[in-house]
Amino acid sequence: IWGLRNMGGMSDERGTNLLDSGAPFYDAYETADGNWVSIGSIEPQFYAELLRLSELVGQRLRKDHWKARTVAIKLRYPDFTTLSRQITLDEPTDLDSEIYTLALELWKRTWMRGKSVRLVGVGAHNLVRGGEQLPLFEVDPNDARREKLRRLSDAVDTIRSRYGARSLQRASV
């Protein structure tokens, strides 16, 4: 930062620099203790948070034996304009990876480029009870993959419920 400042690439005026709202994909927020935090939607931390929210939704669905036919996101901008978008699925899901993929797709379709976001939320709607309809004739190759993901999700849920929510985390998004 000091190097950029010395070369004239940063100024003392808030909101004119790359890391304090001067870039269209960043914004800076004052924290409760008077410090500042800067988050941009292109940062790995944003995608990690979207994944964490998706995993939380999936975990709650599985815990209560629900599946969602609809995955939704909510975005709130600094002026408190709130947008909600959703996708309705052919097959209900409770899998973290499917919820995350859909939430990310909705995010990309909804986010107004250049606008910072105050809040992002992931939700599940149009819930149905657990079981799946088994195919009568053909077996879809994706069924085996989904079954593996379901067993993995169940194992992760078991570990997290026993040792805490942060006991097991993904290495990357």
Image (tube, rainbow, N blue to C red):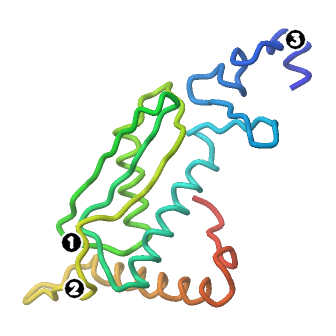
- Residue 128 location, quadrant: bottom left
Percent coordinates x, y for residue 111 in the rendering: 41, 36
Task: Give yes or no for contact between labels 1 and 2 (Cβ–Cβ under 8 Å).
Answer: yes
Residue at horizontal 87%, vertical 11%?
Answer: 7
Residue at horizontal 43%, vertical 84%?
Answer: 63
Residue at numbered disc 1: 91
Q: CA distance from mark 3 to mark 2?
A: 61 Å
Residue type, mark 3 in image: Met
In the figure, is residue 1 to the left or right of 115?
Answer: right
Percent coordinates x, y for residue 90 in the rendering: 17, 67
- Residue 3 location, quadrant: top right
Residue at numbered disc 2: 132
- Label 3 crowd bin: few (<14), some (14–19), many (20+), radius 10 Å: few
Q: Secondary structure at mark 2?
A: loop
- Label 1 crowd bin: few (<14), some (14–19), many (20+), radius 10 Å: few
Q: Secondary structure at mark 3?
A: loop
Residue at horizontal 20%, vertical 79%?
Answer: 140
In the figure, is residue 76 to the left or right of 89?
Answer: right
Percent coordinates x, y for residue 21 in the rendering: 65, 24
Residue at horizontal 25%, vertical 84%?
Answer: 129
Of the image marks 3 and 2, the number of the one nearer the N terminus: 3
Q: Nearer the viewer, mark 3 or mark 2?
A: 2
State the residue lying farthest toward the front. Answer: 32
